[in-house]
Image (tube, coloured by chain):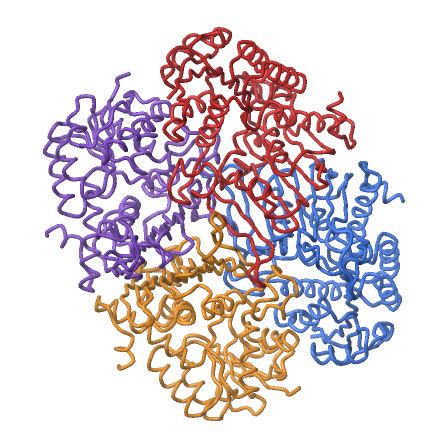
Chain colours: A blue, B red, C purple, D orange
Amino acid sequence: MAKLGIGIVGGGYMGKAHAVAYAAVGAVFDTPLRPSLAMICTTTESGAAEKARSYGFDRSTVDWRMLVADPSVDAVVIASPQETHRDIALASFALGKPVFCEKPLGTGLEDGRAMLKAAEAAGVVNMVGFNYIRTPASQLARDIIASGEIGEITYFRGEHTEDFLADRTAPASWRTRGRANGCMGDLAPHMVNGALALAGPIESLVADIETVHAERPGPRGGREAVDNDDQGQFLCRFENGAMGAIFISRIATGRKMGYAYEVFGNKGAIRFDQEDQNSLWLCKGGAAPGRDGFTRILTGPEHPDYLAFCQGPGHGTGYQDQIIIEAKDFLRAIETGESVWPTFRDGLAVSEVIAAAWRSSGEKRWVSVDEIRKG
Amino acid sequence: MAKLGIGIVGGGYMGKAHAVAYAAVGAVFDTPLRPSLAMICTTTESGAAEKARSYGFDRSTVDWRMLVADPSVDAVVIASPQETHRDIALASFALGKPVFCEKPLGTGLEDGRAMLKAAEAAGVVNMVGFNYIRTPASQLARDIIASGEIGEITYFRGEHTEDFLADRTAPASWRTRGRANGCMGDLAPHMVNGALALAGPIESLVADIETVHAERPGPRGGREAVDNDDQGQFLCRFENGAMGAIFISRIATGRKMGYAYEVFGNKGAIRFDQEDQNSLWLCKGGAAPGRDGFTRILTGPEHPDYLAFCQGPGHGTGYQDQIIIEAKDFLRAIETGESVWPTFRDGLAVSEVIAAAWRSSGEKRWVSVDEIRKG
Amino acid sequence: MAKLGIGIVGGGYMGKAHAVAYAAVGAVFDTPLRPSLAMICTTTESGAAEKARSYGFDRSTVDWRMLVADPSVDAVVIASPQETHRDIALASFALGKPVFCEKPLGTGLEDGRAMLKAAEAAGVVNMVGFNYIRTPASQLARDIIASGEIGEITYFRGEHTEDFLADRTAPASWRTRGRANGCMGDLAPHMVNGALALAGPIESLVADIETVHAERPGPRGGREAVDNDDQGQFLCRFENGAMGAIFISRIATGRKMGYAYEVFGNKGAIRFDQEDQNSLWLCKGGAAPGRDGFTRILTGPEHPDYLAFCQGPGHGTGYQDQIIIEAKDFLRAIETGESVWPTFRDGLAVSEVIAAAWRSSGEKRWVSVDEIRKG
Amino acid sequence: MAKLGIGIVGGGYMGKAHAVAYAAVGAVFDTPLRPSLAMICTTTESGAAEKARSYGFDRSTVDWRMLVADPSVDAVVIASPQETHRDIALASFALGKPVFCEKPLGTGLEDGRAMLKAAEAAGVVNMVGFNYIRTPASQLARDIIASGEIGEITYFRGEHTEDFLADRTAPASWRTRGRANGCMGDLAPHMVNGALALAGPIESLVADIETVHAERPGPRGGREAVDNDDQGQFLCRFENGAMGAIFISRIATGRKMGYAYEVFGNKGAIRFDQEDQNSLWLCKGGAAPGRDGFTRILTGPEHPDYLAFCQGPGHGTGYQDQIIIEAKDFLRAIETGESVWPTFRDGLAVSEVIAAAWRSSGEKRWVSVDEIRKG
């Protein structure tokens, strides 16, 4: 088994998730390439050393350039703030090192375009971390739709709703500063990617985005203005003609992980809610009279990427397992030299839709995604 | 107990539902006014006689004018096709007879305006049959919102989804002919009324409405064009500033009675689905750490209009009971001389929103409801 | 249409439910026999007159013998306390009048046997009010099982759980006095009847019954001993060899109408909970790999006794509708002269099982129901 | 960080799960002791080498004695068939090496007693692998009960239902041979342990256990007798007086991971189903009138052992995470020298209950667990 040195930039929540994933993925999936935790980069010396020790990295640094350049690092995982994505990715590609970048691709369209261009120029494996669409249930949803099992799609509804800022007395923080950290910047990419994966490219949309709680207690007293959005939604048409609607919120009281979708087709329908991530609800047309309805399918060994985690159906996978599946796919891409979905190109497609939503909300009109693509 | 002669125009599904309701309502609610089934009007002599016998009316007719004018008829229930609503209502008001009219008010704005004008000119009790909002659960939802229990509303999502025309090989029928019988004409009024009741007046919206299956098998062979809509949706803003979204469909495979809504407030949230009409899901802010979540409240004697049907919580009410509740409220209005919500004015408000949706979909732009009101 | 005078003994919760049912049933089901509310009997003159007025009876009495004997009363509905059942039924049968008796048949085995004997000697229509098994969903469950759709039954689990006495500070009342009003006496008959209807006769059982809260506040202060049971359960074997288990409780905190069952067969399974009475969950064997699961079937027009209440699936029926269905079936039995399930014979079978449970709990051993039948 | 060499006996499903767990646990929980995968033992040379490579062990063997004795192995995980547990555990204890043993403790009481005796004589850390009770949700359930939040327990119902042998044409295999591999031997220990953890020691029980499908197709044609049980159930009383019931089945059509329980207390209730392992349903008494019900609590950072896996509530953990939690606790026990629940003593308590169930089913009578303890 070949070894592959992994360097992770970012020691927070996502950095840890990837560290755990690379520690476990070889045993879970029996991957031909076996990752080793080569180096981690965080913002302070002591923090970096501490994270390295805690997560099991060989070494640490506070300079991502050092990490990218280090010979022990064969592939780079970017789990740092969005404004750092672009430079790290470009530096990695310049050295021919594969890059896995957390969603979204940088802070917006410009970053995404530059990152895609660099990736394609370098011809190096690249991938974006849309983990939620990689659960066995959502992979199953994609398979069902792709196989025509529910017929032609007539309607798609997606949401990503959480409530971590529903309380208007919650203090201002990095989350309430900067468009990239707002609801459309930070949460929406997951569900937009889900929509594209499940229902195909979006042709046009009309959006409404707002900051509901315009001020919050400042971290050191007083009040601080919130300069990004709390919720946003849009109607859309997919290129295949299907109608769609997407809603994103960080103030949806009571919702914790409301990454949820419904896909109606002319022969069946699918419903999914990440808060019960081990179930997919399927209604198939053609049932006997009086036997029609949604069936709760518990994920199991027949479904994508499940068996590696547990032998029995219904035993279930969780959040961390999604990251392990990503790690497996990234390793496979490196092994074969062929990027796997979603690549930077797919990540940019997500950013284009979100840019269209911003323009639509600002100009209060329908906007075609093509209009964004053309600048 | 005073008697009140009820005349029902229409012998179909809804006519029957009202007939049963007036047969039962006195015993259920101990109403001071006791209705008697005076006369029913349907389209054929034999049909009318048959319905009268079957539902227990004293007499029958094929001429709604005769019914309206008959001295035994003290109040008129209109359960006939939408194009008949206006004339029947106007004739009833001319005689000073209270009118209960099935939703929506006629075939559109013009009918609704004329009907409201006549009702107010006559000063006679008038009411519209939006039955779904009268379940104990939805009444509870209104109470919870009105009391401020979930704080200020930040988002409303409503849908009314069914699948009776999801199969594209289902033949053409009256349902696929005429805008008034389409998805926005026939299904949407329920949920638009629900939205107004729960979240307040709508200020503006942007809609998308379409006919997905443009042709269907003709009832006598061949193909027939479908000239009304299969599904429609809109984004909106309420006058209180809250965002909203509404989706209506008759082709939502697997959905049977998807009258469903979510209302997010800054102190709590509500979720409801008519397919489980005896539950309301409530999340209240301020729970102890780790005890947060949606509570499934089963309707019971503490909730509006429940105790008359059953003493125990969770024993449940059904579709027919909604119509009985309407009958009770209509009788109460007649008894007191004061119309109860929703009146023709409320019904017209619903029609205005739907007219705005049509205009928005046609012109592909945001439309304010005020624009409709002003013509 | 022939008229049929209905006399109801009992003006409480159940008396009202039956009054409403007979007011509505003709219109709902177009029954050939049309009931009229002839007379009601309650315990006080003023109460009886008040109930007659409120529910719409022609006359009232405080003497059930007068009601039974009255020529305007063609059929008798017994909705009075259990200790009155026997005498009323016997007097009715003596006059050849059909009897509908609320569950259970009197206060125990002796009553039940006498009542069955009288019914069969008189050759008069007789029926017992196990309403919960008459929902469209539970009728569907019976049909599915009877048709072999889930194969041979291997396991049955039933419960009837409510929580109206869960709070140990709830005061003593008639509900806490007398075995007939306890949990096994008052609640258990519904689910035992359900078990027999769904899985067939019970061969033997082993039970455990207890009073958890042995004292309660007296209605006039002080403490009062509770002399009946709060909860009980038994394991059983059905005559077909299937295993079973039943649990009954009035102290099951949080459960409001927990009439619920699961039936496992070797080709499928069924799950039902009355708290969502318009759904039946069906798992059918033989699904394609990865498509296995329980399907939530919403009751609709294809299912028993549904269409009379509503045309559309998922629109739903409620508690009162169950009583209307009972009324329809009782009228049909009278019309045809043939009793319909569940007759007094079926009601006695339920009492035998409960008697076996009491003996088993007292003697702490397995008891065959046959042992009870033989005395 | 100190290193700890882990030796795993068994290369099947559970062996892999533990291998993954020890690969990941350090990074997940930042454990002071860091495990290394020292050696794996399986039944064939090639298999052992292959598993070692696949799971990432340094070395492999087919002789568990070699593994136990190897100086690189500091702690032993037994994930091999039940009949091997005893010898391996005793050999490990003899060398003073901590043992984690998969449930149940050997093939029955005799094994369990010997294993406990050896563990206590050696004074070495010992633990049993009841993983399902270690989900954040079930740990939360334990905490809620222990804190008195639902008051005194009045009733416990547990089940462990799966359907992997529901199809009677499924062929005979090791699962259908030998009592230890039957439903009571293999599945029941999980839920019995859960019952003891949640509701306390069981005082007595009455059980019924059976083989439903007595023959199955032989693996090489013909028919083979099944010599172990397909399903079993018992009523019980806990030492605290609460009633209980437990049902175990491997033929429960449609159930995939039906490890489910309900706990009723006099101040609240809990419901849980492993098929939705990231939710705990809690009903707390004392709600405002009309606001009573079960709340679906999604597990989150406030709940035990959750935060290490994901920062956000509702993001969810899965089967593999349970094993990682076990690994963390085993490491902590080794580090501190104090065994953590459930120890071999707890495992033996489970075996005693199951032995009581077997005796009860055979003799068709109530059996006290004390009777088993005394032999």
Q: Is residue D105 visible?
A: yes
Give the residue displayed 67% in from the left and 16% down from the top: B110
Query: Quadrant of the rendered structure where residue B167 is?
Result: top right
Give the residue displayed 26% in from the left and 19% down from the top: C3
Query: Quadrant of the rendered structure where residue B61 is?
Result: top left
What x and y, as percent, mark residue C362? 19, 62
- Between D93 and C309, which is closer to the camera in this rendering? C309
- Between D129 and C110, which is closer to the camera in this rendering? C110
What x and y, as percent, mark residue A321? 62, 64
- Between B116 and B223, which is closer to the camera in this rendering? B116
Tag count: 0
Q: Is residue B326 left or right of residue A99?
A: left
What x and y, as percent, mark residue D297? 54, 58
What x and y, as percent, mark residue B298? 46, 46
Give the residue displayed 47% in from the left and 60% down from the top: D272
Q: Is residue D174 visible?
A: no
Q: Is residue C333 above or below residue B301?
A: above
